Amino acid sequence: MPGKKTIKALDENKKIENLSPDIEDSTGEIITTNTGVKINDDHNSLKAGDRGPTLMEDFIFREKITHFDHERIPERVVHARGSGAHGVFRVYESMEKYTKAGFLTDPSRETPVFVRFSTVAGSRGSTDLARDVRGFATKFYTDEGIFDLVGNNMPVFFIQDALKFPDLVHAVKPEPHNEIPQAASAHDTFWDFISLMPESTHMVMWLMSDRAIPRSFRMMEGFGVHTFRLVNAANESHFVKFHWKPLLGVHSVAWDEAQKISGKDPDFHRRDLWEAIESGNFPEWELGVQIVPEADEHKFDFDLLDATKIIPEELVPVQRIGKMTLNRNPDNFFAETEQAAFHIGHVVPGIDFTNDPLLQGRLFSYTDTQLIRLGGPNFQEIPINRPINPVHNNQRDGYMRQTINRGRSSYSPNSLGGGDPAQAKAAEGGFTSYTEKISAVKIRERSRSFFDHFSQATLFYNSQSDPEKQHLIDAFRFELGKVETVAVRQRMVGILTQVDKDLATQVAHGLGLEVPEMPEKPINHSVPADADPERYEPFPPKAPVPDISAALSMANTVKNSIHTRKIALLAADGVDAASLTTVKNALEAAGAITEVVAPHLGSILAADNTSIPVVRSFLTAASVLYDAVYVAAGVSSVATLEADADAVHFLNEAYRHCKAIAAHTGALQVLEATYFFKKLPEDLSEESALMEGVIVGEDTAALSKTFISAIAQHRFWEREKPRRVPA
Ligand code: HDE
C-alpha cells in the first residue's frame, strides 16, 4: 500500500523525526491567536456598533492582518520556481578508498535527503515547461552534518568565471524596460550576450536540446557540474564529477507540446512529482561518480576546472555507487521547499572543493543570498535547514534566533565554559581542508587551458540522433527567430559555424540569413580592457575526443517500462465496457496510470449498462497531459467521439507529438476522422504498428501487449517531418 510506505518513511527517516516538533496540526483543535488566546469570533472585527468603524484595540484583527501583510519573502534571484520532496539515500558499497564521508562509506546507513527541482529564469509563479535549465539540488542530512549537492540537469554551465554570473542572469531574465518575456530565453538580451560569449556555446547546445523540456523531474539526469574532490582517511584526494541517473530513463516532451502544457497545466512537473510520491511510485536515481586520480589532472585536452566541459563517459566511466528514493511530499510548501537554503559550501569531511573559478564564486554567493532572502544569519535554524546532528558553536543572536544558548561564554578560548565547545581532531571527525599545494602569483586572468570553446559543443551535436539534431535546429530557429535585432541573429549563426557547418546552415536558412563562408572568429568580449587580445582569442575547434559520446543522446536511454506513464482512455456513453477495461487493466498491471476521458464528467453508461467513472472531460483534459491514448469500441460511443471535434483533436495532437495511439478495431471510425489516418500503413496490428506507434486490433490482449511496447518507446519522433497534422 503506497500510503503505508509513506508512513514507514516518516517513522524511519531521522530528518522527519527532526522536523516533527515543529509540525502543527489543527485537526480537532480550537483556533487561537499567536499568543495562544482562544478566539471566539474569527469572522467579525471589533466595531463601534454593528455598522460603525473598526476599533484600534482589536488585537485579533491587527495580529491577523499584520501577519498576512508580511507573508511574502523575496523569491530566489534565480531558480525561483521549484518543487521539493523528502527521501533517503544509501550507498551500495563502501567508497572508503576515495572518501571518508560516512554516507558514502557505510552501506547500512540510510541518509535522509531533501531535493528541490527548479527552473532557472522564471518567477515563482511561472510555467514548469519553460525551455530552461532545471536545478537539481540535494541536501543530504548526514550524521556528520549537511552536504548539499547543488546541481543542474545539464552537466556544463554558460560561463567559466563566477564574475560573469550577474551578467548572464541579467541577460536571460525579462528585459529591464518592459519586463518581457517571462521564463524564456528567446529574446534579444539573452542572445546578444550569448553571441558575444563563445564560452557559452557548449551550454547553449544543451539548452536548445530537448533536455531543456523534460517530460518529468523524475526523468531527468542531474549533474554536480564542477569537478569536486573526494578525500579519504589517509588524506589522499581524487577528483570527482557527480551524476544522478534516473531509473525511469531520460525523456523529454516536444517543444510544441511544452508550449501547450504551459497553458493547460503550468504546474505539470510539480503535479507529476507530487502525484507520483502520493501514489507510492517513488522516484529513484542512482548516484554516479566519475573519479580521476590527482596524477591524471592534466591528462585531458580540456581543463577539469572548466565548468563548460564534461568528462566524456568514454574517457572516464560513470560508476553507480548508490540510490536515492524520494518517498515523502512536504507538509508545507513554504516552510520546507521555499525556505530550503542550499549552499555549495555545505560539505562534510571526505568532500572538498577544487579551484574551478565558478565553484569558488558560488561558495560566496549562496550564503549571501540566503541572508537577504530568509532575513538574517539564523536561516540554518529553520527546521528544513537544520542538520540532524547537534550544532554547538559560539555564534549568537541575530534576527529570529531560535536556539537558547546556555552559559556565560560565547567565545573561544574560554575557561569559564570549561573551554567548550571544543575543537575536533581530524580523527574525531573534524573537517580539515585538503592540503593542496599552491604556488602562484595573484592575477586576474583565465588559464589558456579554458579556451577551446567549441570542441565539446561539436561532440554534443555529433552525438545526437537525427530527430534530436532536428529539434536543436528548430530550437535555434525558434529562439533566434524571436530575436528582433538581425545583427544578433547573424552573430549567433557565426558562432554556430564553429560547432557544425550543417547546423549553422540550417539555422541560417530558417532565419533567412547568409551563412558565413569561412567560420568567422567569434569575438570574445570577456577580455580585460588592456589585455593582449591574441591571448584571449578562442582556440579554433579541435577534433573532439571521442567523436561521439553515447551518453549525450537521450535516444540511448532506457526504454523498458511504462511505469507511471499516463494514458488517456477515450470513451463516451455506449462504450463497449470489455474493450475499455481489458486494456485499462493491462496498462495498469504494467505500472501505467490510466484516466477515462469523455465528453462529460461523472460517469458514462456502457453498452452493457454498467457505469464507468470518468476522470476528465475534454474540457479539463488535453492530449499534451498524457503519454499515450486509447480509443475503446462501442457503436454509440464511437459515433459520439467521431463527431466530437475535441476527441478528434485529442488524437491528432497526440499523433503530432509522436505518442503511441491505440484503438480497438471497433473504434476505427474515430481514427478515420483524424488527419493522419490516411497516411498510415494498411496493416496496423503487427510490426508496422510498432514502427508507427499506431496500433489497431480486435484482440485486446494482443493489442495491449503491442501498445505497451509502443508506449515504452516514449515517442516516435520520425513522424514529425513532414508535418502531417495542423493541431
Ligand atoms: Fe546557482 N544560485 N549560481 N548554480 N543554483 C542559486 O542561491 C550562483 C550555478 C543552482 O533549489 C542562488 O539560494 C552563482 C551552477 C541551483 O534552492 C544564488 C553562480 C549550478 C539553485 C546562486 C551559480 C547552479 C541555485 C539563488 C555562478 C549547477 C537552486 C537562490 C558562479 C551546478 C537551489 C539561492 C534551490 C541557486 C548563485 C551557478 C545550481 C544566487 C553566483 C553552475 C540548483 O546564490
Image: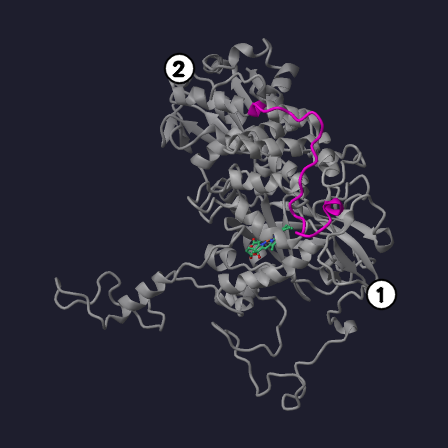
Q: Position of residue 590 (x, y in %)?
A: 60, 33
Along the viewing direction, whichever of 261 and 88 lies nearer the viewer: 261
Q: Position of residue 165 (x, y in %)?
A: 60, 52
Q: Residue at point 47% right, 32% down?
A: 260
Residue 282 seen from this side? no
Nearer the observer, disc 2 or disc 1? 1
Q: Which secondary structure lies at badge 1?
A: loop
Along the viewing direction, whichever of 527 and 131 lies nearer the viewer: 527
State which quadrant residue 684 falls in: top right
Which amino acid type is marked by label 2? Ala
Taking 96 as reference, is 265 left or right?
A: left
Taking 592 as reference, is 93 left or right?
A: right
Residue 517 sits inside the magenta stretch? yes
Along the viewing direction, whichever of 653 and 276 lies nearer the viewer: 653
Q: Position of residue 610 (x, y in %)?
A: 40, 26
The residue wearing badge 1 is 234
